[in-house]
Amino acid sequence: MTNVDPPLTQYGGSDGAGQIAHFVNDDHLNLFRLNVGWQFLVNGQLESPLNPGNLAKYDALVQACLKTGASCIIDIHNYARWNGAIIGQGGPTNAQFASLWSQIATKYASEAFIVFGIMNEPHNIPNMNLWANSVQAAVTAIRSAGAISQKILLPGNGYFYPTHIGQCERSSSILTFERLSYTAAGSFVSGGSGAALSNVTNPDGSTTNLIFDVHQYLDLDSSGTTSECVTDHVSDAFSPLATWLRANKRQALLSEIGGGNTQSCVTKLCSTLDYLNANSDVYLGYTGWAAGSFNAASYVLALTPTSDGGTWTDTELASQCIVAKFNNGIASLSNGTANGTASSRNGTAAYSRSRVRREKRGVSSPF
């Protein structure tokens, strides 16, 4: 994750800046999730400060996003790990994690449209209370660096768990498979993330602008790896979570959702976004996965638009669901923006621009 190409033409990558401008100016989206690897930012040296050269590359993407007037999520895309070791639980210390976020927040403290995404998809975390302590260390570092008004996204745990999906027609066997549930909305409460992260506060003891961060995919095993969608997850995930959020006077952002450019995904994703739009008091927005450097011909979840002579064309899923649903039901953050982004599910990508969603919507692109 130290030798990557940003989705920017000046670095030999895709036209990420052009994509963001298209999503904002033509599609009226306003939130982008810009994923970056911790290793990339410090050039692979855990104890080192942010590497000036690598930071300049990432910042070029951030500035291209901010230039449009959109909100831009800085997302550390490390799954709560450094080279496989879990933060605060045998891996980097909470102080090292806090140092990373202190440096990032110092750089962007004056940018009102920056959103701090603490961590992409923690999973298989042994102790959620210890993870909440790590998240608290990051929040305290961000606020102490002077970033006192921006939103911070608090991510929960995820895991594999067995799921029964029905009975085989030719036998009495129950079909069971492993469901992948990374930071999933459906397990945020039952898995203990909600309770643990509810204890994370700002230095003044408040929870103002501390937003729960959830993901959810709509394919058979919820992994976001196949082109067909089988559920909108309203009844089993988003509705129960909405009830819990209201009861606890909290809000969440769905920072990853997506699917293939298929009719099943158009149907299911549009249904999901309809629900989120109707419950915007607790769901601030959603971000789609993913655009930027992803090629629609080779990546099943690509939302990357194509350009021909300066004219951009969106994918079917982006056009019919992300863009259409956003513009039909805009919900705003406190700064008046709607949210939605797209981002890459490739864990080797150093960072990506995020894609569209309701209160805040946009697109992601991998570095």
Image (cartoon, helix red, strand yellow):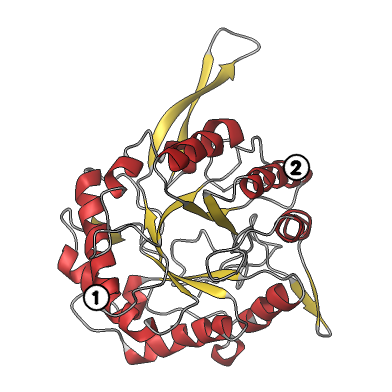
Q: Where 247 sits versus 92, above or below? A: above
Residue 42 in sight from this viewpoint? no
Q: Nearer the viewer, residue 100 or 242?
A: 242
Report which quarter residue 298 is drawn in: bottom right
Is residue 55 rendered to the left or right of residue 271? left
Q: Which residue is mark 2?
A: 267
The label shown at residue 269 is none
User: Callout 1: few (<14), some (14-19), or many (20+) C-alpha neighbours within 10 Å?
Assistant: some
Earlier along the polypeptide chain: callout 1 or callout 2? 1
Residue at x 47%, y 51% (from the top left corner): 252
Q: Position of residue 184 (x, y in %)?
A: 46, 44
In the rendered structure, which amino acid carries the disc numbered 2? Thr
Secondary structure under the numbered disc 1 in the rendered image: helix
Secondary structure under the numbered disc 2 in the rendered image: helix
Q: Which residue is mark 1?
A: 144
Disc 1 from disc 2: Cα separation? 44 Å
Residue at x 64%, y 35% (from the top left corner): 231
Residue at x 55%, y 82% (from the top left corner): 66
